[in-house]
Image (cartoon, grey):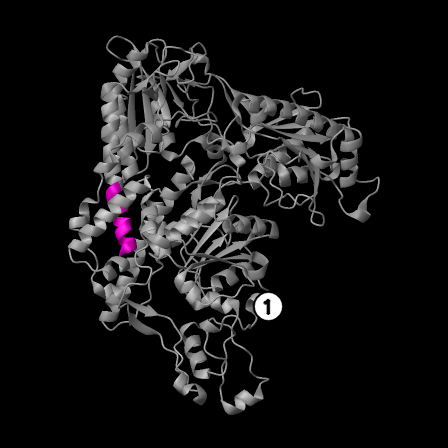
């Protein structure tokens, strides 16, 4: 499954975090060992906080925005398990529809293999509701589903999926990756005896000493003090026979405390109660990953947001339908509103049929109808009932019975029907609340709100149900790339605010400007704080401004060029046979001592069982031989796919590496024990090789003209990036206009005004500087609510520059463009910064020839373009080198 660009960015940030976390953890425990060697006791430092503080100091954490639009980094909240050990805990802030579950499985793979360096163990996957539970179970249980395949890859094909009531043994955990799904209410207990999770049972005997083995129970409790114990006060016979008798509950809750699971918390913002949090931490987790579109960023249960994916990323990746059209009938009732929605669905269906005839792509638009009542005994004339809507659709609008489904908590006519199948007849789904979560059919286009009294609440709760784009790909047909909401007799401003609130709840507050409102006739109605910003009066006569893109020559295309495709044009042309693990002859493989491992296991001596002196031992064990399965070659090859996308080549490289290591006399036992460290080292080495080869290929194609930074001859070409003449934005009363440092109006901004919220500190300083330079004719922050200008280089991720400046002063009196990318303090070894710097330097050196070859001016009177990186500790110097002084 190919990840979207923003998803790859999320995983790069997780990799970065895990690397720093590993270093801080190693330092913390090394200090403890050092103190012990001096005869002193010491507790490990809060290495989780230290890792977070380091990332924050290096400007590597995301900025969030408060209710006033001010940017801030979420402060870190330390969390401790039941034994007062620091828990690594992060939150991935991803909008609804952004692939939270996919990212969770990918993050879990990295945590297991890169951080804990293991394939097996226990994962506790906590979900907030039955609907999300069923959906997640269905996805993880399907061996063909990408989520399950990622888990299989992480575990070497040894996944065991569990529910709360399932029995499992210690051997299951030692031999498989056990993933248990659990609903939050099952974990967020109010008392120890109210939920089955914490009750004594006979299903987990392999984890505990026998009940009457007081010595064994006491040793286990000494090791894990937060285990629940049975109350033996009413069992006088045991107290009489064994004074001070102790028995640990053989409950699932206690098993979790022993196995120390990695915890995934879906919809993490719904697990902020004291009870929920203390229970989860009490499971002694090794790691916690929260998933949320709207995490809590203040208070005692705030989330540590490591990743913040904005709604614009989903829009850019064609994952959602925008804009949202809110259509309100001022004088109509629910029947007229349903008729209008039905007519719109008919128009969408005709467009979908035309699309299928043209491209073969199948879409069947579906309408969601939100009513006020659904129960059998709740039907009266005062409220719109589900059966009222069904009858009207059939009797008055001619809809077929089989096209309608009722979806309620008590009557689920949808069941497990595959709505994406071209054999499904469903076009209308009537509901009240059952589709508020855990439902993501991208064929839903129209939302009809027939509950007048709660219309705004319904909009807020259900807007996310119609946002997903079928197949995550635009149709390039306006009607099918938008979604539609029908209300009646509502204040349109309030309705739009309801949609915006819904977008905020789905984690897409930044897309509020995509909401459009009309009345029943289709006439536009004013939307609060909607602004159209035109060019500054000094630049109103500036014609269309074009920027060149990185293109690849293609004689089959009408204009002889197309946008560079990284997989096709770069990876597809590398000589994969030339890659090998060059460090195989010298890489250090830990000695046999690493094969010693401590086993937290109960060792019951049968010879003394009858005496009540059963022993509990936590022993040091030496691995004498390779496990029966040996090296899991398929698993190891799959780990290389991130770098070597061809599994056959990955197999070749791995086989050659293992052969070399064996020829050095390294035993199979040592290879097995070090396999994950070895793969990590191989990936680092191979990634450098692939990047170097890709860079050389990119340069070769630049020199030959196969790749060029250029403008094509036609001004109407989609290959040229055209800067918009007006900007459509939505602002709030709290948004502030950016002024010059002296309080005056900006004089050289290309547009009439710009808001502070669009700038971080370095961008703001750069803008102020540009506005006061005589050599600057005008400047503009390129990405302001429009498709951003980007540059493709020899690495997969595209580069999105921040600012564009038009400069005076070339020798022949022509203007020139300067494209600027700001970056926080330059870090030694920061590959991303170094890559962007090299790419900018390279494109600048080739820009002159490439642009002239296009025979089209960037802008009348402009003939040069340069690309400059501005680093926080030297940005003024870099601007001066670029001639901006």
Residue receiving disc 1: 191
Q: Quadrant of the N terminus?
A: top left
Estimate the x, y position of residue 546 in percent, counting from the top left.
39, 16
In front: 507, or 871? Answer: 507
Magenta segment includes 677: yes
Left of 704 or right of it: where is 548? right
- Residue 554 appears in the rendering: yes
Estimate the x, y position of residue 341 in percent, counting from the top left.
70, 28
Q: Residue at x 22, y 24 (%)?
A: 700
In front: 526, or 259? Answer: 259
Vertical position of residue 190 compared to residue 291: above or below: below
Vertical position of residue 575 compared to residue 302: above or below: above
Vertical position of residue 191 compared to residue 647: above or below: below
Report the span colored magenta. Answer: 674-686
Q: Residue at x 34, y 50 (%)?
A: 634
Q: Residue 272's image quarter? A: bottom right
């Amino acid at each position: 499954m190919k990840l979207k660009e923003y998803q790859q960015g999320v995983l790069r940030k997780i990799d970065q975090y895990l690397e720093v976390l590993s270093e801080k953890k190693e330092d913390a425990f090394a200090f403890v060992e050092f103190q012990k060697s001096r005869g002193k006791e010491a507790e490990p430092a809060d290495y989780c906080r230290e890792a977070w503080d380091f990332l924050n100091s290096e400007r590597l954490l995301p900025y969030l925005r408060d209710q006033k639009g001010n940017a801030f980094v979420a402060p870190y909240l330390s969390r401790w398990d039941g034994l007062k050990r620091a828990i690594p805990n992060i939150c991935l802030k991803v909008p609804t529809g952004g692939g939270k579950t996919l990212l969770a499985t990918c993050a879990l793979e990295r945590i297991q293999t890169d951080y804990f360096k293991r394939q097996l163990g226990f994962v506790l996957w906590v979900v907030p509701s039955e609907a999300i539970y069923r959906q997640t179970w269905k996805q993880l249980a399907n061996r063909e589903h990408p989520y399950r395949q990622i888990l299989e890859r992480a575990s070497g094909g040894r996944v065991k999926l569990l529910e709360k009531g399932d029995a499992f043994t210690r051997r299951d955990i030692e031999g498989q990756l056990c993933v248990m799904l659990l609903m939050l209410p099952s974990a967020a207990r109010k008392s120890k005896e109210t939920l089955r999770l914490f009750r004594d049972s006979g299903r987990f005997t392999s984890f505990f000493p026998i009940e009457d083995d007081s010595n064994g129970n006491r040793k286990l409790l000494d090791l894990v003090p937060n285990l629940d114990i049975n109350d033996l006060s009413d069992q006088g016979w045991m107290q009489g026979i064994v004074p001070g008798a102790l028995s640990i509950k053989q409950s699932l809750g206690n098993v979790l405390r022993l196995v120390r699971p990695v915890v995934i918390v879906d919809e993490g913002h719904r697990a902020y109660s004291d009870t929920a949090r203390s229970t989860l931490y009490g499971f002694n987790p090794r790691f916690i990953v929260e998933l949320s579109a709207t995490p809590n960023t203040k208070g005692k249960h705030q989330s540590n947001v490591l990743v913040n994916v904005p709604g614009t990323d989903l829009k850019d990746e064609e994952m959602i339908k925008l804009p949202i059209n809110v259509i309100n009938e001022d004088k109509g009732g629910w029947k007229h509103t349903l008729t209008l929605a039905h007519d719109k669905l008919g128009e969408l269906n005709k467009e979908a049929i035309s699309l299928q005839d043209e491209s073969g792509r199948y879409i069947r638009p579906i309408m969601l109808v939100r009513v006020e009542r659904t129960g059998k005994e709740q039907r009266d004339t005062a409220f719109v009932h589900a059966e009222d809507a069904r009858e009207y659709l059939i009797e008055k609008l001619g809809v077929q019975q089989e096209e309608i489904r009722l979806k309620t908590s008590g009557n689920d006519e949808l069941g497990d029907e595959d709505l994406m199948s071209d054999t499904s007849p469903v076009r209308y789904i009537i509901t009240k609340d059952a589709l508020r979560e855990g439902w993501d059919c991208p064929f839903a286009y129209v939302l009809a709100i027939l509950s007048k009294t709660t219309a705004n609440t319904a909009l807020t709760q259900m807007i996310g149900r119609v946002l997903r784009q079928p197949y995550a790909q635009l149709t390039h047909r306006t009607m099918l790339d938008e979604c539609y909401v029908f209300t009646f007799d509502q204040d349109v401003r309030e309705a739009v605010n309801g949609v915006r609130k819904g977008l905020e709840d789905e984690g897409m507050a930044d897309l509020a400007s995509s909401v459009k409102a009309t009345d029943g006739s289709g006439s536009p109605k004013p939307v609060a704080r909607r602004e159209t910003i035109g060019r500054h009066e000094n630049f109103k006569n500036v014609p269309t401004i074009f920027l060149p893109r990185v293109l690849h020559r293609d004689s089959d295309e009408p204009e002889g060029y197309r946008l560079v495709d990284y997989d096709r044009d770069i990876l597809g042309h590398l000589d994969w046979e030339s890659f090998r693990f060059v460090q195989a002859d010298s890489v250090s493989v830990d000695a046999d001592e690493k094969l010693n491992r401590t086993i937290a296991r109960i060792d019951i001596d049968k010879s003394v069982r009858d005496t009540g002196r059963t022993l509990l031992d936590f022993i040091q064990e030496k691995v004498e031989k390779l496990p029966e399965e040996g090296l899991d070659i398929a698993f190891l090859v799959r780990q290389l796919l991130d770098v070597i996308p061809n599994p056959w080549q990955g197999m070749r490289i791995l086989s050659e590496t293992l052969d070399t290591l064996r020829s050095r006399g390294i035993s199979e036992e040592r290879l097995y024990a070090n396999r994950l460290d070895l793969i990590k080292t191989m990936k680092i080495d191979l990634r450098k090789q692939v990047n170097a080869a890709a860079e050389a290929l990119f340069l070769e194609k630049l020199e030959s003209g196969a790749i060029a930074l250029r403008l094509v001859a036609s001004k109407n070409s989609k290959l040229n990036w055209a800067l918009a003449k007006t900007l459509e934005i939505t602002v709030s009363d709290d948004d502030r206009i950016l002024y010059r440092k002296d309080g005056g109006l900006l004089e050289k901004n290309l547009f009439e005004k710009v808001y502070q919220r669009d700038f971080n500190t370095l961008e703001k300083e750069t803008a102020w500087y540009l506005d006061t330079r005589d050599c600057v004719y005008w400047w503009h922050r390129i990405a302001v609510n429009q498709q951003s200008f980007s540059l493709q280089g020899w690495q997969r991720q595209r580069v999105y520059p921040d600012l564009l400046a038009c400069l005076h002063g070339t020798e022949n009196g022509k203007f020139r463009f300067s494209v600027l990318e700001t970056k926080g303090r330059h870090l030694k070894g920061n590959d991303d910064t170094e890559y962007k710097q090299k790419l900018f330097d390279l494109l600048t050196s080739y820009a002159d020839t490439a642009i002239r070859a296009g025979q089209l001016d960037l802008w009348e009177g402009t003939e040069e373009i340069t690309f400059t990186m501005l680093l926080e500790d030297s940005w003024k110097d870099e601007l001066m080198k670029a001639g901006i002084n």
